[in-house]
Image (cartoon, grey):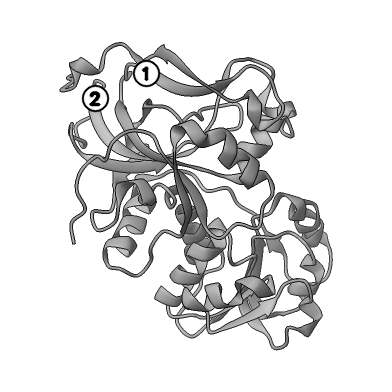
């Protein structure tokens, strides 16, 4: 293992909490800096973000899965710089700008920290044409949208694609990816976000509070909202596909497997290098960009968790953890 930053010392700042509850439970502490094991990389985190699942885990909504072992950490997405490599890692280099996300409710989270260790195969080179802090808004939502459209819904040029909950983290990326894939995208969101969705490339925007007013048939429907799934299911043409990413839509999705009509598919994205690299290419080709509502220092994580609990954001809220990894390349 090599470490070009020995001056960083053996400790770091990380956000932890000792019990489930309100956002005020989050505390920034000085903790031991991790050491990469075999086939892992140590990454200095530049940026991370707030996801709805971070709020749900911290509040205890998922305690049946996340357990009662404390302290816990928070955060999934990251951009950063490789600082050290464990044994057996030959395809990354120190100083390399990378990005990715951590998964697992009872497993590995905690990117709201100055350093993390991560499986080397779960990161890829980060985009070089955008700000590395803002890039942290993309990994988990971007790979989720990519996997949903490319692999599950199998969107093709000329398809009609309906995205429900289109102004949020996944939805805002899915609009851009759908357009890049050659689809005609209709965005279902609150009326206040219609212009925002059109600005991302949607050909039309409709009110998701009134799905009965949406007409025509769609080749693919991506639901990021979880309500009125029965109405959206009826909009899928014969041979088309529909899926939901919303927790509150999972029950209906499971029942759809044994009821008339198209099956509503579900999925959970995993951090695979090939998908992260494909997402990075979309960014560097200027086909998609991160949608960042706000950027704040790590010290304001409590404030951002409170905002995230209210929902209805546009894109993502980002935290800058340490200094930039490297300059943007135009």
Res. 278 in view:
yes
Q: Quadrant of residue 309?
A: top right
Q: Residue at x 74, y 34 (%)?
A: 61
Q: Residue at x 64, y 15 (%)?
A: 69
* SS assignment at label 2: strand
**Is 86 displayed left or right of 224 in the figure?**
left
Q: Quadrant of residue 78?
A: top left
Q: Residue furthest bottom?
A: 216
Query: Spatial distance from mark 2 to mark 1, Cα to Cα?
Result: 18 Å
Q: Nearer the viewer, mark 2 or mark 1?
A: 1
Q: How many marks?
A: 2
Residue 295: % across, % down: 44, 47
- Vertical relation: 297 (above or below) 211: above
Q: Quadrant of residue 37?
A: top left
Q: Which residue is mark 1?
A: 12
User: Mark 2 packing: few (<14 Cα in 10 Å), some, or many (20+)?
Assistant: many
What's the mark number on residue 85? 2
Q: Residue at x 65, y 31 (%)?
A: 23
């Amino acid at each position: 293992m090599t470490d070009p930053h020995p001056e960083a010392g053996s400790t770091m700042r990380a956000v932890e909490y000792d019990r489930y509850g309100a956002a005020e439970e989050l505390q920034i502490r000085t903790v031991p800096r991790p050491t990469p094991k075999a086939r892992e990389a140590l990454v200095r985190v530049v940026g991370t973000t707030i996801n709805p699942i971070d709020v749900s885990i911290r509040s205890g909504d998922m305690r049946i899965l996340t357990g009662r072992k404390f302290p816990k950490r928070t955060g999934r997405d990251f951009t950063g710089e490789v600082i050290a490599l464990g044994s057996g890692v030959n395809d990354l280099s120190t100083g390399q700008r990378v990005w990715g996300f951590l998964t697992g409710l009872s497993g590995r989270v905690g990117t709201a920290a100055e350093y993390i260790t991560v499986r080397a195969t779960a990161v890829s080179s980060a985009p070089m044409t955008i700000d590395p802090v803002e890039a942290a808004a993309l990994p988990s939502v971007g790979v989720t949208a990519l996997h949903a459209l490319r692999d599950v819904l199998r969107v093709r040029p000329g398809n009609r694609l309906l995205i429900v909950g289109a102004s949020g983290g996944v939805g805002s990326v899915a609009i851009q990816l759908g357009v890049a894939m050659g689809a005609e995208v209709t965005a279902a969101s609150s009326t206040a976000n219609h212009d925002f969705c059109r600005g991302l490339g949607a050909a039309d925007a409709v009110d998701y509070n009134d799905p009965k007013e949406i007409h025509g048939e769609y080749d693919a429907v991506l639901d990021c909202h979880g309500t009125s799934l029965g109405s959206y299911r009826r909009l899928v043409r014969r041979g088309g596909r529909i899926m939901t990413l919303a927790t509150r839509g999972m029950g209906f999705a499971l029942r759809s497997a044994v009821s008339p009509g198209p099956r509503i598919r579900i999925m959970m994205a995993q951090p695979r290098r090939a998908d992260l690299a494909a997402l990075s290419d979309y960014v560097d080709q200027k086909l998609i960009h991160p949608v960042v509502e706000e950027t704040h220092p790590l010290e304001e994580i409590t404030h951002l968790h409170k905002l995230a609990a209210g929902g209805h954001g546009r894109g993502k809220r980002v935290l800058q953890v340490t200094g930039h990894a490297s300059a943007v390349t135009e």
